[in-house]
Image (cartoon, rainbow, N blue to C red):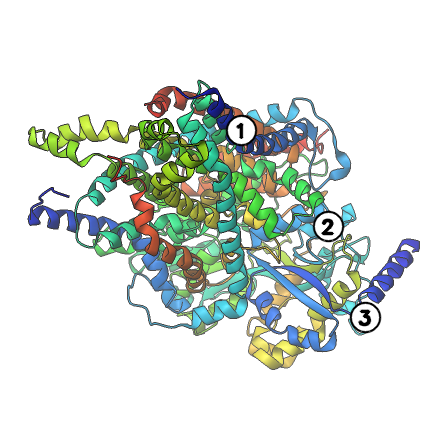
Amino acid sequence: MATRQTRTLARLMMAPSVILLFIWMIVPLAMTLWFSFQNYNLLNPANVSFAGLFNYKFFITDPAFIQSIWNTLVIVVGVLLITVIGGIALALLLDQPIFGQGIVRILIISPFFVMPPVAALVWKNMIMHPGYGVLADINKFFGLRPVDWFAQYPLLSIIIIVAWQWLPFATLIVLTALQSLDEEQKEAAEMDGANFVNRFWYLTLPHLARAITVVILIQTIFLLGVYAEILVTTNGGPGYATTNLAFLIYRTALLGYDIGGASAGGVIAVILANIVAIFLMRAVGRNLDK
Amino acid sequence: MKLTTLFLGLCGASALAFAAHAETITIATVNNGDMIRMQKLTDDFKAKNPDIDLQWVTLEENVLRERVTTDIATKGGQYDVMTIGTYEVPIWAKQGWLLPLDKLGADYDTADIIPAIAGGLSADGKLYAAPFYGESSFVMYRKDLMEKAGLTMPDAPTWEFIGEAARKMTDRANDINGVCLRGKAGWGENMAFLTATANSFGARWFDEKWQPQFDQPEWKNALDFYVKLMTDAGPQGASSNGFNENLALFQQGKCGMWIDATVAASFVSDPKASTVADKVGYALAPDNGLGKRGNWLWAWSLGIPAGTQKAEAAQKFVAWATSKGYLDLVASKEGWANVPPGTRTSLYNNAEYQKAAPFAKMTLDSINAADPTKPTVKPVPYVGVQFVAIPEFQGLGTTVGQLFSAALAGQMSVDDALAQAQQVSVREMTKAGYIK
Amino acid sequence: MARKVSTQRKWVATIAAWAIAFVIFFPILYTIITSFKTESEAIAGISLIPSGTLENYFEVQSQRDYFKPFMNSVVISVGSTLIALLIAIPSAWSMAFSPTKRTKDVLMWMLSTKMMPAVGVLVPMYLLFRDTGLLDTRLGLTIVLTLINLPIVIWMLYTYFREIPGEILEAARMDGASLFNEIVYVLTPMAVPGIASTLLLNIILAWNEAFWSIRLSAANAAPLTAFIASFSSPQGLFWAKLSAASTLAIAPILIMGWFSQRQLVRGLTFGAVK
């Protein structure tokens, strides 16, 4: 259907973005690969030498490594579950005619406007702190002992904070898709006597498939790299309970200044992220073709 | 000598070149109250040096450390003056990244700098950073609660006394915890406190051959004591509390005792912010009779990166900000209580300062009780009281801090935490080439 | 909107929505409230009524000028988003309307350029920026943010463009419209809502980017993220001041959101198309 001419033109139009992103990918990647084979501590630049695969071996045998991968996945899956399910629910709710719709919308999407380190600080100290946080005050009001969130449920606390930041994004994308759903189709289904559950399952959800896929893919990329929230709240502790891959790399790069080790960690993270991405594409990618 | 001459020549040349315009120096600084105050007082510096403009980059401690370390190690040249601590100075000086401060002026009086602090900022007898503000740690306690418990705090308590007092002062029903201590994982968080404490228990990070010492009984005693004390008498949420969280608790009257930075004294005794301002007493950090106390030593200091093109102007600024005259300037504008503490002996001989800051003597005694060059009971190959001044320490200290905070949170036994700490330390130190 | 909705149902939905909105917005609301408290009030336990002091705002402004980092934030986030859109629109167009077997892989690959953990490449990037003289320049930060957000921009535009029925374009083509006319007169008007919401979302993402914007800037190009970093976690009590600084940093984007939320949410409602 498309002529040869438009096809060539289409390739040309893609070129700038592809070339730029290629450079943006290949330059840091090449530098990282190069450094990953070096013994290079930033604070000891006189001692640079070839390290072979030692940095990789060292990173993989880190006592926190296995748990950090597990924690990374738990954070991604946990936040995705909350944001996708919550996002769909909120989008359905916001799609209803309600009083003050505009205000409600802006209130719900506003967590997206808060910078991650600030969000983490606010949650840690003003909301979750067992001594003077709001949740502790609520517990005390009901005569309960305040929950020590970051000691008792460290990973869950991180997930809650991150999910709070990403819920608006999911809601927004799903809501946008929801509003392009054909009114006539909806009405027809309603008249056929389909109940809410059936309508949602057979009409709405399939329509939202692509939007949900986009939410999952984009969020996964961001969630694999969560570390600012961890740094501000728990510093990866207690133990390794909240150490994820990104935090482990942070520790190596900006606390240890071990550039070789951090680069090896970066390469490993890229490989793992790609495995996750391939898996995701298999699982949800076909929704994009529709 | 030759290099210095050449260097001075270059400075002279650049000074000539820029004589017409004002020269702008960029200063990276930490966002604590004393540094903020300095930024507001720079009119005085401008009046004395009309040809130098100042530009500030103010950041919180962790971000600042990342930024300046990356910049100086890669010779990025973004800053002409950097605010650094006693941890960085020995490491950077060894790399030749800092200019020795030998042009601070005739009336600067280097000998007036408190010896313990000057020692921490010097290498090979040369001063590489000028202290702007110095601190140690000590015990702050509630006089009223101590009295209620029927005890008297000695000027130099033992850990045994602290343990007893903390348990007696604890009153869970009224939300009063006997003692508040740091628990949040991090080399500058719980590990600052625990390393200093371990020193007083006779423990050390490494022996003379850089072999980690977490498998030794001294560490076990120290960590055991800490975890039991915090379980019996510490606040809820201790494993994520740092300086600020404990400060908030103490100011609200929820702590009987708090062992932390001496600078906290000016916050807890400030009636505008603290509900217990008139009830606070001070004592030296505790010991176990082994000859070392559990207090640390830290100084935020101004250093000049070796690569700067504006060394002369930078040195002029450093001299101004850390001079006796600056202390007088702050005193005249904001009162003696707001003078940056812990840098000059003359300040502590000043009767007006002693009157304005009731904790002055205890602060000076605490600073003098810390010796970064001989921090531990047994000999060690490193300098630093609450840290080990090697490049690997930030990462390693944070990992060990994570393990110890898990022990505090009850997710791991003390023995497991120590065993794992030993394992990761051996690993890191072997990688870095200390253990052959 | 022919659907008839009972008032009762509308009220139930309204109450539920407001309750949830309150819970979600609460941390921000509390931050704003705290910014009007004194420091000792801020840690004295829950209270929704501040003493109304403006001291924190004066204190924040006297410590650090707000205007310069604000302008930097505006220039960097708007600039990077506009450039990203310029590059992304043709690209997303060709992927949506002239797809090949490889399109999906190319899309995925683009997203995968974001997988490199930023902390792992900080030092290589810093060296690169030092050598090109881009350290602490608005241009440098704009370039980085453009490249960081480009994959997201392409993805969002791609999804929006996919919603536009291809038949309309083909019809236009049959009528003899040139490719240029097709894009300008047929595609663009239909895609405007999608482009608008992509634009807004990416300004927000760029506004909040807190890793590179702090690490690659010093005195001149530092945006509001660095402004915030100069108020968080000093020694001493800082809740009220940090809250005031945060409120100042969030406010512009929140206000922009207020005025544009209809575009932000509407995205795709191609009334005419359907």
C-alpha distance separating marks 2 and 1: 56 Å
Circle 2 residue: B90
Q: Chain of mark 1?
A: A
User: Residue A72, located in which quarter of the rendered image?
Assistant: top left
User: Is B44 drawn above or below residue A78 in the view shown?
Assistant: below
Residue B175 percent location from the top left of the image: 33, 58
Q: Nearer the viewer, mark 1 or mark 3?
A: 1
Q: Say which amino acid is labelled 1.
A: Leu
Secondary structure of the residue carrying tag 2 is: helix
Give the secondary structure at mark 1.
helix
Residue type pointed to by label 2: Pro
- Disc sitting over residue A12 in the figure: 1
Q: Residue furthest front?
A: C176
Q: Position of residue A51 (x, y in %)?
A: 70, 25
Residue in the picture at 74% in, 74% down: B49
Give whichever of C177, C38 is nearer the camera: C177
Q: CA distance from mark 1 to mark 3?
A: 66 Å
Q: Earlier in the sequence, mark 3 or mark 2?
A: 2
Looking at this view, is B24 or C261 the one in front?
Answer: C261
The chain ID associated with circle 3 is B
